[in-house]
Amino acid sequence: MSCMYFDCFAGAAGDMIVGALLDLGVDFDAFCAEIKKLSLPGVSLRLETVQRRGLAGKKFHVDVSADEQPNRHLSDILELIDAADLAPRAKQRARDIFNRLGQAEAQVHNIALEKVHFHEVGAADSIVDIVGAAVAMDMLGVEEVYCSAIPLGSGTVECEHGVMPVPAPATARLLAGATTTPGTDDGELTTPTAAAILTTLSESFGPPPAMEISAVGYGAGSREFGRVPNLLRVFLGRAGENGAMDSVVELSANLDDCTGELLGAAVEKLLAAGCLDAWATPAITKKSRPAWVLSALCRPGDVRGVEKIFFDETTTFGVRRRACGRTKLLRETVSVETPFGPIRVKVGKRDGRVVTAKPEFADCLSAAESHGTSVRNVQAAAEKAYGETHGA
């Protein structure tokens, strides 16, 4: 499985992320052709090699010739992305990043999500940085993203609303649930754009996963710091053959006064919000009351949003959380031909050996309905086809 690790030893910004990804070997002309699909007026892209404290890196520039940029709300930016003919995975990642950024801004200003007005991150250069990161990752074939602890910095930063403490309010919201560090230099070390990208896409924060490194890229920031080179380092490779490891958070709440209808709706909302899983377990709680334990598994950066769903959609007065380490089989999806049409098969490997191979249920259900047969017949045909073509 292709994976990527962001080493934020000096912090991160949107242009640093894109520069590092381009330094990994993304064809710049092909990248520019993808960004052009956004139809942003007066925008041109440049890439140059620079040095920071003697180390070389790529500096990504977005030049905007238009004198004024239009005011953009979240819906405006999502429409811009939807209208662009981008790869589906790149488009979805870009949408997820902006949605997360919008939720953070809405919480900071205590307004409805649809009323959020993006200032700095709504400008053309920030849109290009976010969409560009999603596009470059897709061009590199990245399936999973990991990140180091994220440096915060100190002092103040000047933004649209005036002078703000570091990290800026939206950045602080975005970093809730992530692992952070003060950093080695003063000033804003991680921008809201970078925080949105890294917390949306990263599986976990901390040391790098076991991986076979194939390339290392460096993205340069705009200014020099006093002690460390202002660079973002990114490792590209494949997860170790013994499986992938990450960190997740399990949230749960005991519910003894919640109807089955509300409980079912809460599970659906948790899954729709991006939880890795959500479930309800029967239990006997205090005063010998029959109850349910509602649980959800999510990435560390999504904890605040998932907690909000618990409180908004159920009757609970409190939500428990615990950090979990997780070992996963290396996963890939292959397609096999059956008498009922092509069926995708999810394959899990460990130590280079296939541990499990399971036909995708949605494919089997659709094929069964269109051919007037049972799902079990389609599953059996897919398993047989996989065994014949892959020697299992």
Image (cartoon, rainbow, N blue to C red):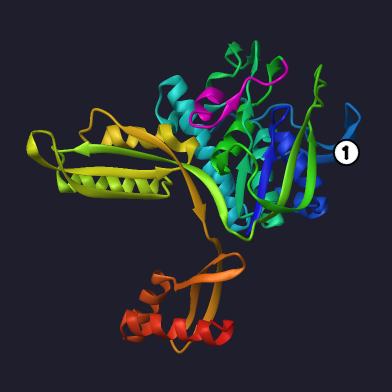
Q: Inspect this view and state whether residue 324 appears.
A: yes
Which stretch appears magenta?
170-185
State how many labels appear: 1
As for residue 171 lying within the magenta part, the answer is yes
Determine which quarter of the picture holds residue 354: bottom right
Residue at (64, 37) in percent of width and height = 127
Q: Is residue 22 left or right of residue 259?
A: right
As drawn, is 339 to the left or to the right of 208?
A: left
**Front-most of residues 1 and 343:** 1
Q: Position of residue 170 (x, y in %)?
A: 53, 24
Would you say 363 lies left or right of 45 here?
left
The residue under label 1 is 48
* Quadrant for the N terminus in the image: bottom right
**Residue 26, position in %: x, y?**
78, 52
Residue at point 60%, 38% (across, down): 198
Query: Who's the residue at 58% across and 81% down the image?
Result: 390
- SS at badge 1: strand
**Closer-to-camera residue (349/366):** 349
Q: Establish if 41 lies above or below 212.
A: above
Q: Residue at x 45, y 81 (%)?
A: 383
Percent across and percent down for residue 254 are: 22, 37
- The answer to whether residue 371 is above or below residue 98 is below
Q: Please indicate, yes or no, whether residue 37 appears anywhere in the rendered image.
A: no
Establish if 182 lies above or below 209: above
Pick out the residue farthest to the bottom. Answer: 339
| Residue 142 lies within the magenta run | no
Q: Is residue 265 found left or right of 53 in the rendered image?
A: left
Q: Amino acid at mark 1?
A: Glu
> How many other residues sit within 10 Å of disc 1, few (<14), some (14-19) or many (≥20)?
few
Query: Residue 98 appears at what percent x and percent y?
Result: 54, 38
Q: Nearer the viewer, residue 391 or 273?
A: 391
